[in-house]
Image (tube, rainbow, N blue to C red):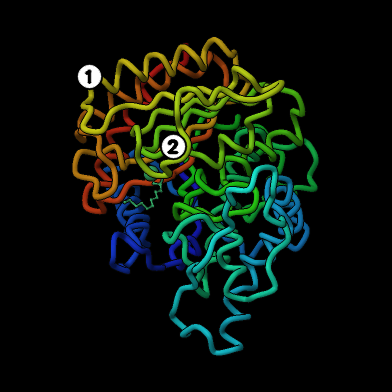
Amino acid sequence: MLALHDADCLLHETVEFIGAKAIPAHESPARLQAILSALKAPDSSHQVQELSYTSLPETAKNDLFTTISQNHDAGYLHHLQTVFSTWRDKDLVEADGSILPECWRFPTSIKDYHVSPQAPRDIYARAGFYAFDMSTGIMKTTWQSTIASANLAYQGVHTLFPPSSSSIATTTSPAPEEATEEAATPPPTTLLTLCRPPGHHCDGARAGGYCYVNNVAVAISTYRTQFPTARIAVLDLDFHHGNGTQELYYADPSVLYVSIHGEHEFPYYTGAATETGIGEGEGFNVNLPLAPESGVGAYMEVLDKAVREVRGFEPAFVVVSLGFDTYELDPIGRFRIATGDYEGIARRAKGAVPEGVRSLVVLEGGYVVEKLGENLLSWLKGWEEGTEE
Ligand code: OKP
Ligand code: ZN
């Protein structure tokens, strides 16, 4: 299977608070390194295509930024891009330090009183205004990795659905004489984007859960430019509930969000089965929380439900948010899935994709670095062999 990667995704390396301790974040560059070595091993049947956001022409960069801006607030994006240098100029953070929030927007107990939606003037307070937890520090290369990660989702959709217009630039634009030959190659039916940082927790204006820009939303917005009204299904298989993705499409009947995740786990305040969508989007959000310590048997039962939901929706495009923190030894996930189980899980999950429909697999979490490669290879085997139904 084809996987898209950008070396800039390895740069971001921050800290998080767990309990009373600040530790190097579980979401580390080593995760991506492990995945790359597995995919590039001599006996691997997979291909890694290296992209480079940095060397894109300005027009493509602008187009990507416009796409991101469809889902994220301008003040928030400005904050992500500038906060580190602003703090650094004032000597408020070390060159290799990470900015973490100290005070969040909070609901008051006064009925019908709403906290001002304006970003506070105070420089420390703004870090809290644009975040919802202390796992999502901003260091000097955070934006560079974030934009490279988003670009993978953007380019991934362009690879699956080659735009007819030549205005969309990629880093691998063929020379004119090769262009016809290139066009003759049919696009792949599925591909994997090695996104890092991940994306499913951040919403329109807040970073959280190691996420800054929602890569799935970037993929959906990119797809929408070609297919404005087609139905899109998101199947979120990370251990954690993708609150950001849920929120972005909560009122949207053209995007079905289906998630299997640990019950009562991070992000704690979302993911209940009672969250079914709002307004026109009512019925198009399906949460399938599963008790911690569940093994593959219980998981497969709920996966069957998820697959039926997606199939019933008859999507024209399927996006998978793929996390390996469902693995039995994961430090922050609590299911009991074994390496060998991923093959069967992916084979079953592939049944969610209707025949002839293309799919994009977007990397989210998974924190047992030593097993990430093996787990992914097992999953990809099942995904490639599994049939669209
Ligand atoms: C991101 B993804 C647990 C603290 C959790 C953040 C977890 C983010 C998970 N005690 N901190 O969905 O893999
Ligand atoms: Zn997760």
Residue 89, percent across and down?
61, 88
Q: Residues within 10 Å of mark 1 (few under 14, many from 20)?
A: few
**Amino acid type, mark 1:** Gly
Identified at 54% across, 10% down, the residue is 312
Which is in the foreground here, disc 2 or disc 1? 2
Image position of 56 with respect to 169: above or below:
below
Q: Which residue is mark 1?
A: 297
Residue 23, percent across and down?
30, 67
Image position of 87 with respect to 178: above or below:
below
Instruction: Specify whether tag 2 is near ligand 1 (CB below 8 Å).
Output: no
SS class of the residue under badge 1? helix
Q: Which residue is mark 2?
A: 241
SS class of the residue under badge 2? loop
Confirm whether residue 46 shows in the render.
yes
Instruction: Specify whether tag 1 is near ligand 2 (CB below 8 Å).
Output: no
Confirm whether residue 358 shows in the render.
no
Between residue 185 and residue 326, name the one nearer to us. 326
Between residue 373 and residue 70, name the one nearer to us. 70
Q: Residues within 10 Å of mark 2 (few under 14, many from 20)?
A: many
Residue 335, percent across and down?
25, 34
User: Alpha-carbon distance for marks 2 and 1?
Assistant: 20 Å
- Dot 2 or dot 1: first in sequence order is 2
Image quadrant in which you'd find residue 284: top right
Image quadrant in which you'd find residue 295: top left
Identified at 21% across, 35% down, the residue is 339
Residue 7's disc is none
Identified at 53% across, 85% down, the residue is 92
**Amino acid type, mark 2:** His
Identified at 23% across, 24% down, the residue is 296
Between residue 56 and residue 18, name the one nearer to us. 18
Report the side of 76 relative to 235 (left or right).
right
Residue 385, percent across and down?
36, 22
